[in-house]
Amino acid sequence: MATYQLNSSSDLIENPSPRCACMLVLDTSASMFGQPIRELNSGVQAFISAIKEDDMAACSVELGVITAGGKVTEQLPFTTAMNISQCRHFAASGLTPLGEAMELALDRLEERTAAYRKAGVAYYQPWLVVISDGVPTDQWQAVSARARSLAQQRKMVVMPVGVEEADLEALSAFSTRPAKRLDGLKFREFFLWLSASMSRVSASASTTEQVRLPPTDSWDSI
Amino acid sequence: MALRARVVTDSLGKTRRLGKRLERGGEGEIFALQERPDVIVKWYYPEVLKKRGDELHRKVEAMRELRDAHMTRDVCWPLIRVFDDKHRWIGFAMYRARGVRMGFLAHALLYQRYFPGLDRRQIVDYLIRFVEIVQQLHRAGVCIGDYNLNNIFCVPSTQEVTLIDCDSYQLRMGGTFYPCPVGSPDMTPKEHQGVAFRDIVRTPRSEAFSLAIVLFKCLMLGRHPYDIVGGDDPVRNLRRGNFAYGHGQRDVPQGAWYDLWRELPEPIRDLFVTTFTAGATAPSRRATLAQWHAALTTYRQQLEAGECPRELARPSAKPDSQVLHAR
């Protein structure tokens, strides 16, 4: 089932592309059971295929996935998109330890950017996307302050997305940008937007400037 | 977007139908022209036209006055003004560039797919052509300003190079100065860092710095001259003239990169070292386009005579090895 190709240790040495790390923190708690988790899974698959279709983005985007469903699981350690062969499907169960999942995500992002610096690889601002349909069921206030402060210093783009009855206020606390609400279960549209954004970032000649992102009207609701 | 009429007229009122949308850029969209596969149309977004349509129109008109036969072949220069169905100016038509973006050539993993059989001779041929085209623009008083490898097209297995996205170029016409309002810090010399791009006056010296980064990235298969092990981001290193490759290895990234560097002839390495160390702060120390042209031409002759290695590194040839060699 788990068929990720291992992150080759030589990847940071051989591939000269500036990197854009993108960490997905996904709520896979019991409330996502049924249609929502199916749509989420197919959205993640569509995201990976779309990135791989763009060679520049496939060499540049490094994807990591952490799920919060009962327990926190690191489903995919940071891997350059071109080296991801297949993605496992996530099952929905348990509570939503989103605080712990975000803590792990921030640690992994810091480790990864340190590895880039050590290998002499330039990088764009990393992205942290968090998607939830509820409220965190563990402690999340401290980690939300940590995430927001990184976003404020423009060291990271934190993008919270709420599904259905999600607590947008809690999700917004993780970032300097307000959480957006997904229109229905338009996970696929969201992930296609995310891949278009990643393509735009990786086509940019600049590792330090902000990139204008495509409009979000295909997936968000007011 | 789909509601937009896909019919345009030229300045004589002749109707032309647009074909497929080829590209969605930052300022507008590029369309094919039906029945003319060699011509494309740039249609600025309505919000761009609303905000600075008059300014763009004046600049594109000035560029059209400057055109000459050489320039329009090597650079996708605005040739024909284009109007919508209500006779409002919306952009221009130009020849379509052939080939592949230089960003795919300057990439250790991707060049093998886009430029099969590429060797150093071919890279140097493209770079000589590129320098010649920029020299031709400079003679006409035009500066590129926004150097970007994705705006340089190379036709595989030929020596053909074409530049695109030229409506951002800086020029002077009839006493009016048209700035280059875009750019990226990673390709911009120190004296222009931190200044709004539209307020910068590009000079032959600032152009020489950005051009040297393009040459370096191609000869080094995608490395930026200022990516450094344990160092800061490329822009901070650029501002400090912190160039790792100098004479002898200092903080060069791990892998085949130092081997690629060492295989360049000494005169080429010297021009890079001077441009990226002393030249980072002192524009007069930067190698000029004429110096690059001469050094690359000599390098080309040495490659032809078999005096320098022609082959390029194949970084993925030995997946288990941490140590890679350039040949």
Image (cartoon, rainbow, N blue to C red):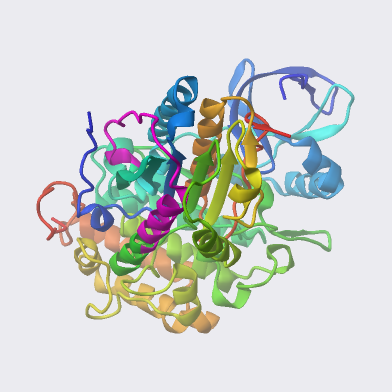
Dividing the picture into quadrants, the one containing residue B176 is: bottom right
Q: Position of residue A47 (x, y in %)?
A: 44, 32
**Residue A178 placement, left or right of B3:** left
Q: Nearer the viewer, residue B19 or B251?
A: B251
Above or below for B259 versus B13: below
Q: Is residue B107 above or below residue A3?
A: below
- The residue at the point 40 percent across, 37 percent down is B155
Determine which quarter of the picture holds residue B57.
Answer: top right
Most foreground residue, B166 or A10:
A10
Q: Position of residue A36 (x, y in %)?
A: 49, 25
- Quadrant for the C terminus of chain B in the image: bottom left
**Coordinates of residue A170 in the picture (x, y in percent):** 61, 50
The residue stretch that appears in magenta: A81-110
B82 shown above or below B225: above
Q: Is residue A86 magenta?
A: yes
Can you give x and y, in whole percent of width and height, for residue B249 in the image?
22, 77
Whether residue B265 can be seen here: yes
Q: Residue A11 versus residue B42: which sits nearer the camera? A: A11
Q: Is residue B8 magenta?
A: no
Q: What's the residue at 48%, 20% (across, down)?
A: A35
**Which is more toward the observer, A165 or B45?**
A165
> Looking at the figure, which quarter contains the N terminus of chain B?
top right
- Number of labels in the image equals 0
Using residue B67 as the reference point, say whether residue B108 is left or right of it.
left
- Answer whether residue B287 is visible to the viewer in this image: no
Q: Which residue is depicted at the point 43% across and 47% down?
A: A97
The residue that appears at 80% across and 40% down in the rendered structure is B47
